[in-house]
Amino acid sequence: MLFFCQKSEGLYRSERSPLTSLCGAFAVFLYSSARIVRGENQGVGYRFESYREEGGRIAVETHSGNFEVQPKSWLTLSGDVVYDAISGTTPTGSPPPSTITFVPDQNGNPPPGAMNQSVPLSPMTDIREGGSVAAGFSFGQHHFAPQFSISQEHDYHSLGAAFNYSIDLNEKNTTLNAGWSHNWDQVLPNGFLHSTVNKEVDDLFVGVNQLLGPKTYVNFNLTYGHSRGYLNDQYKGVLFDTFPQGDPESPALEPESRPRQRDRYIGYGSLTHAVSKLKASAEGSYRFFYDSYGTVSHTANLAWFQKVGKYLVVSPMFRYARQGAANFYVVRLPDFDTRPTYYSADYRLSKLESLTYGLNVNWKFREWFWVDAGYKRMVMQGLDSVTSASAYPTANIFTIGGRVWF
């Protein structure tokens, strides 16, 4: 059953935007016919993930649990809970102090730290608690799945609902999918924000899963998303040269200004092929993204799933992503009185690329008990000539988890 999952879009979620995870490929490897056998995935699982950016930047420790049960042949119930602890520092939007003119002291000297060549960082801590529940109803070839989710941080609350429909065709070798989701979000006062504001997000999804043969499986889908309301990052500012600067550690910034609406268009395709002679499978995928900010991104992912002996699967992966800058991205602005309507110095909106590589190991101790562990490294760098290289993070991601099957 395909679920169109809800996700919070709070600050640290955006900070972790390059982070994605392997999902489902091991099951595809074991299930060579690539058909989803409903009712055989009953169980409970737990996962711990540690995401740490180097240099004292953002660190997130995530504990998550999930369950899936099938009380009736036509009914599947599932859910998950998540607890995130976030700490560390994040860029404020200011360029490095060495590029800024500061008010000199009484002796005519610049203040301490004025020659620092790294972007200023601001400390942050937060706790996120969230969860979701879903029910899957199967009536012959038709499958329906409503889902509800909730997420809460000290500065961000989110409620979500989704509905998914799929139909099996061609003796279950073809599955057509469609889904809709809606989020009702509240951004609470903090940073540059002084009152509670609202944000809503809708996503529409259509896709197809197709079995090409006993060893090859493809998936294609298209997503349209629309966000409206407060879309700024309340912690990000922009430097204006017309304002005198006194503190290199905390330059005076003005709040960024993003459009109050955003449209997103996403195309995704993947192919999984079992290599029987090697007891392995390969998976490749491509994702295209375009939005009304003018951002265009391309993401390619490759993974290999190698069975070693009877109980072990080793999975190396490689991902490359490249994006263009938003049409209102700036590093700084010269004059506040002649500022454009929209502007942001958030490095995540700049022209950049990221490379992620890693390895996951899945060990089946028993037919009813699996354990997996993995490591990934993500390196991001800018591709323009104006954004400081110190703005971009390098992160290490460790995961470990287990699942008990009924």
Image (tube, helix red, strand yellow):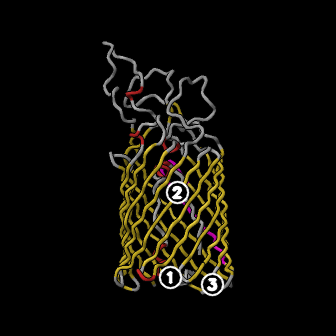
Residue at image location 51% in from the left, 21% down from the top = 242
Residue at image location 40% in from the left, 51% down from the top = 379
How far, Cα to Cα, is label 3 from label 2?
Answer: 37 Å
How far, Cα to Cα, is label 3 from label 1?
Answer: 21 Å
Which labelled disc corresponds to residue 299? 2
Q: Position of residue 27 (x, y in %)?
A: 48, 77
* Magenta stretch holds residue 148: yes
The total of numbered circles placed on residues is 3
* Nearer-the-camera pick, 316 or 149: 316
Nearer the observer: mark 3 or 2; the answer is: 2
How far, Cα to Cα, is label 2 from label 1?
Answer: 26 Å
In this view, 193 is above or below 252: below
Q: Quadrant of residue 183?
A: bottom right
Q: Position of residue 277 (x, y in %)?
A: 42, 83
Q: Amino acid at mark 3?
A: Trp
Q: In the image, 160: left or right of 389? A: right
- Tag 2's secondary structure? strand
Look at the image and give the residue range highlighted in magenta. Answer: 143-157
